Amino acid sequence: MTTTEHYSAETANTSLLHYAARTPEYARTLRERRSLLWNFVHRDLLGRFKGSLFGVFWVLIQPIFLFVVYFAIFGILFAPRLEEGPDKLFALYMFSGILIFTAIQEATNASLTSIVNNANLVKKVKFPCELMPLVPAIVAAAVLVVGCLVLVVAGLLIGGLVFDARLLYFPVLIVAFVGMTGGMGLLLAGANVFVRDIAHLYRIFTSAWFFLSPIFWRLDQVESKFSEIGMGWLSYALMLNPAFPIVMAQRQVFGIGDSLPPAEYAADFPWSLTTNVLVSLAWAVFFLVVGYGFFKSRRHKFADLV
């Protein structure tokens, strides 16, 4: 039986902790409204390519083009030089990181405006608007899976990937991705209703976040540079980045970096795959609890502000 909530500025409990403790109810809402959720996901996925010549094939074309560009620039022209020639695996290393960080960025940016852009639905008291920030997270996860297929094909063509039992972690990573971006989306979407500058500030933040994440750099190289100036501890601070474990775990799932000497691998991948996956899930739970708690505690004011 589907349950609905009626919101009133006078009677609603506005405690973040009150709703954070009730986060498991979010799973029940998603289960009860799964048909509605998937309708929104389907609409969002098709809507972004509506009117285009290639339609949904752009989901495949975009990562292919992205890989070709990064392979040409960072895999051949500006890749680290080894005795046997360019280190083409550097392109795979970068591409894998860019894939998942871009997905995080797209999911959270779209979630951020999901409430203010659907004012007509939000003003309907019975509508479960907590579904809206999760839609971009699911869509981005689907696009990420397609991008990873391109990564696999590229790895088969140029070598550098290892396929073994670690692939079983991939679905768990997707769950962690949806949980983390969905939770962040709830927090950002709720905050954006009250302060519209959040959208602009978040774009600036994600630009810095990109370079603070292990996309273009390897942890052992960064640690060496920081140590030279007596600030080696900063390399450990970078590991507190919520994107760090999920980016590194994706590389480990596909065996990117397995060809490194053991000492270099240990320096670049300080955490095991299992640890990275568990930390990613922990971040997902954290953002879901905080995001859901904040979103629901402010839900009763949305209709008046959007």
Image (cartoon, rainbow, N blue to C red):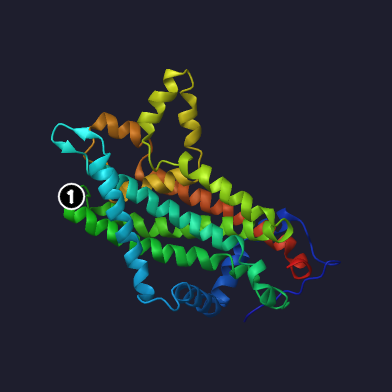
Q: Position of residue 181 (x, y in %)?
A: 52, 57
Most extreme residue toward the left is 84
Residue tagged 1: 159
State the quadrant of the N terminus: bottom right
**Residue at the spot x=48%, y=76% of the render?**
47
- Horizontal side, residue 220 vs residue 33: left or right: left
Q: Is residue 17 visible?
A: yes
Quadrant hosting residue 108: bottom right
Within 10 Å of the Cα at label 1, are there few (<14), some (14-19), or many (20+) other Cα atoms?
some
223 up-or-down from 153: above or below:
above
Q: Position of residue 133 (x, y in %)?
A: 58, 65
Q: How many marks?
A: 1
Foreground pick, 26 / 240: 240
Q: Position of residue 101 (x, y in %)?
A: 44, 51
Q: Amino acid at mark 1?
A: Gly
- Horizontal side, residue 35 vs residue 158: left or right: right
Q: Position of residue 287 (x, y in %)?
A: 58, 53
Quadrant hosting residue 215: top left
**Residue at the spot x=61%, y=55% of the render?**
289
State the quadrant of the C terminus: bottom right
- Horizontal side, residue 238 vs residue 259: left or right: right
78 up-or-down from 235: above or below:
below
- Horizontal side, residue 84 vs residue 120: left or right: left
Q: Secondary structure at mark 1?
A: loop
Foreground pick, 44 / 52: 52
Foreground pick, 55 / 258: 55
Quadrant hosting residue 20: bottom right
Q: Is residue 21 visible?
A: no
**Residue at the spot x=41%, y=53% of the render?**
100
